[in-house]
Image (cartoon, helix red, strand yellow):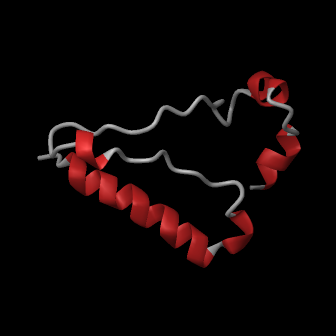
Amino acid sequence: ELDFLYEAKNSEKCLENFKKLSPHLVNYIYAPKVYWNLSTSRLLTMEFMDAAEVTDVSAIRRLGIDPNDVAKL
C-alpha cells in the first residue's frame, strides 16, 4: 500500500542526502516543496515545477541551458 506521507519524507531525505554526499551538485538538484498541511497518507500536495524533461533538448535550449552541461551531470 502506498503512503504519500512516507513518500514525501523520502523526497526531502533524498534531497538532503544529495546535499551532503554531492555538494558540487547542490545548485542543480531541486525537489518540490511538500505542503504538509495539505497532504495526507492518501494525498500528496507539492509545489508545481515548470521544467523540461532531461531528454527534451529543444526545451533545455529554450531555457538558456547548454545541453552538454546537462549531460555532464
Question: Looking at the picture, how far across and down is residue 14, in whole percent?
Answer: 45, 63
Residue at 87%, 44% in the rendered image:
68
Question: Looking at the picture, how far across and down is residue 1, in whole percent?
Answer: 11, 47
Left or right, residue 40 beside residue 19: left
Q: How many marks?
A: 0
Q: Quadrant of residue 40?
A: top left
Residue at 84%, 38% in the rendered image:
67
**In the rendered image, the vertical position of residue 29 relative to residue 57, given as above or below:** below
Left or right, residue 43 beside residue 19: left
Q: Quadrant of the C terminus?
A: bottom right
Left or right, residue 3 beside residue 52: left
| Nearest to the observer: residue 13 or residue 1 | 13
**In the rendered image, the vertical position of residue 19 relative to residue 15, given as above or below:** below
Residue at 17%, 49% in the rendered image:
3
Question: Looking at the picture, how far across and down is residue 21, in whole percent?
Answer: 59, 77
Left or right, residue 17 beside residue 26: left
Residue at 32%, 52% in the rendered image:
8
